[in-house]
Amino acid sequence: MDAPAITLLGAFGVTDGAGTPVRIETRKARALLAVLALADGRPVPRERLAGLLWSRGEMRQALASLSQALYSLRRALEPVVPGLLVTDGECVALDRSRLRIDVQAFERCAADGTEAALRRCLALYRDDLLDDLAIDTEEAYAEWRSSEAARLHDRAASAAAGLMELWEARPEAADAATIDRALRIDPYCEAAVRVRMRRLASAGRQAAALEQADRFARRLDDDLGTAPSTALTGLRDRIRSGDVRPPPRMGLRPVTRRSAWGLSAILTALVIAVAGWLLWPRAPAIPAEATRLLVRPFLAGPNVDPGFAEGFGDDLSTALVRRSGLTILSREAGRTVPEGNEGRMGAIHVLHGRLRRDDDAMVLNAWIVATGDGQEVWAERLSGDGGDPRALRDLAVARVADRIGLALGPVHAPRPLDLPAAAVAPYLSALGQVRAGSPEATARAVAALVPLSQAHPGAAEPAAALALAYERIAFGADDFARVAGLHRLEGYLRLKVLLARGGVPHPDLLAVRARLALRRLDFDAAEAAARRALAIEGAHVAALETLARTQALRGDTGAAVATALRAIGLAPGASARGYEALALARFAEGDLRAARAATVSALDLARGPSLDMLTLAAAIEGHDEDRGRGQTAFSALASAVESLPFAAWRVGRVAYDNPRAATWRRPTPAEAAATLGFADPKARASLLAGLVRAGGGAGAPSSLPQPLSAEALRALLFGQEVVGETSWTVQQPWSQLRTKEGALVQTGAFGPLPAGGDGTSRVLDGRLCDSWVWSGAELETCQLVFPGAGAGRYVIRGEIGLFPFTVAQGARP
């Protein structure tokens, strides 16, 4: 039996000696194993590992997270080969002597330099290092991964060039698959192109060889602004003049006679061949039914901003979907699906593009690759007015639709990019930054989109992109608020102002509305907004994810599973929220095993820790016979709570010298259970029971309460003062006074009324609806109120969190 293997080139993987995959549950545990595998067996200091993968909190917490990851690795690896991890109080090492690691074999072959070794080297280089193991929230790890990937890519490119130079003298020894691999590694490897030209010419395909030379010359000119070397142009000229011919065919006996039937068949075949050659289209048509497309992020050529190129590709995809009903895998999938895996993820074709500016013109090089055989089935250079990219987009949409065999329908509202020409390029650049998704890119997008949105308040696109950015600042990791220079509540308030404008519906805006409705457990509003988004764009992944979560929480688990799987299918390797919805649905069904698998996938794909999924994971593990699993999972939830945004504790005049000491405490099982909002009593009871067992909740309630009725809300809150209590997320004072007529005053910035102040209240459909004015806009949020833990205690559940309170004694005016 072979030794266990670790695969790092391309997609990460671990297999035992029999080739059976070994599952390592979390993304960071896999990344930790990869770092150790590339350390050449040397011990790595624990603080170095913690700084790479858990940089967002204090070192104490980071080291605790490292210990959890090491525990997870040992549990996965010990049954395969005991003792692979060697640890002490200071360092961690991996015993590589009992493993097969592809990077080790790759580097040995690259150093060997023989033809056989170089061929093996290229076979081992399946793709760039850890191309499916990005962790965007950890900058130190991202820099390490990028540096190591660049180093190994350079070695692969050198090996490819070396092998091709050996084969130039003996092109008959070359094989097409290895030449293709060399050009995938380095598209500018001229030696590989020359070997391919020699092979084609030697096979009697001089025209194809010359086409290779012309295509390579165009690529160099478009991408690098250079020309091929004299070695390639000289070879091209020799092929054109007939100096490079196929070898003579030996051993054929002369034909002395032919039957009449044989001569007729030969002549018929010749006529058919000539007619076929004359009538055959220059590029093969793509079957009309093959309409499942993956769009790769467009590349930026000379004089083009990378954000603009990505935004242009995104806008082109949107136009294709809305005008044809084409199924396009999600934008996130275009960034994350490894090259070569597109077919396994459901794509039939892959669209690539590269943009450049030539004086006043915008030039797009677009090409489509079939996933079945990896062949380029269409390529075209399109150009349009550089002052208005929409004309080039519309031309590209028409050409792509023509090649795929789609009928384009009329443009329905919202019209794609309904902006003045001068605003289109800045918007597309900002859209590319939003899609990039990092805190830095999001901050740049906000800076560009705010003036665009103010200048064009009726345009849906800038508002939708800005809403996505503000949503990240309000509810995402702390880095989004910190880098943008905004407090998370300010991000929330700005988001509410955008949504209050109304105007033309946009699927991204509708998806944001749906997610906000879900935060306040308004299932009807969430489902309605998600379905409106899907009516505009049927494959809108964010709307599908939100619809699936809504269905799961309200108890429609069959529909939730189907919707979640559709979202996951459209965003393979990228739909963390799709897996979240699937996990919630499976848990509500009582299938803890399936819920655990979906929860692990959701946590693995999330950009930052998801409190909802950590809560669900703790409940699932709490039901396990091994009590330690539940305790470990609940500790992970508590650690994530401790790492909630620092910026949350600086608003207006309120400031704290020690944010952690002032704000954090461990959640109780009942508090954690209240965050998910299952409508089904059985699901709520199972969630609470698992959390109690995991978190040690002695004296916790046996079930979660139902919200108060409209009559109970009026009697409890109007004409009364309420006093906020400490919670597991906020421990700062607030109080509210409501008159019987509905006037509202809040003291303290951290209550249900964001940033405090005055407002009005009413009861609508069993919800407490508070209205206030901020930045000139009238805003409203409608909240549920639940009985709390203990007599006289209650909890407001709104869009920005849970707020426990008591009612002050004595009625007020």
Image: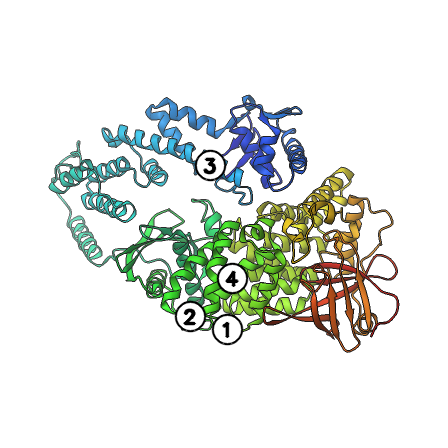
In x, y percent, where is residue 440?
50, 50
Q: Which of 105 and 594 is in front in this view?
A: 105
Q: What residue type is labelled 2?
A: Asp
Determine which residue is flagged by label 1. 504
Instruction: Nearest to the eye among marks 2 and 4: give it.
Output: 4
Residue at 60% x, 50% y: name it.
477
The residues bearing labels 2 and 4 have C-alpha atoms spaced at a distance of 16 Å
> Identity of the amino acid at label 4?
Leu
Q: Residues within 10 Å of mark 3 (few under 14, many from 20)?
A: many
First-in-chain label (2 vs 4):
2
Q: Which of marks 4 and 1 is nearer the N terminus?
A: 4
Please tell me how crowded label 4 is: few (under 14), some (14-19), or many (20+) other residues with Cα within 10 Å.
many
| Residue 466 - label | 4
The foreground one among 697 and 270 is: 697
Whether pointer 4 and pointer 1 mark residues with C-beta atoms closer than 8 Å, the reply is no
Asked whether the beta carbons under mark 2 and mark 1 sit within 8 Å of each other, the answer is yes
Q: Where is residue 534 in the image (x, y as percent from the top left)?
A: 54, 66
Q: Is mark 2 on a helix, strand or loop?
A: loop
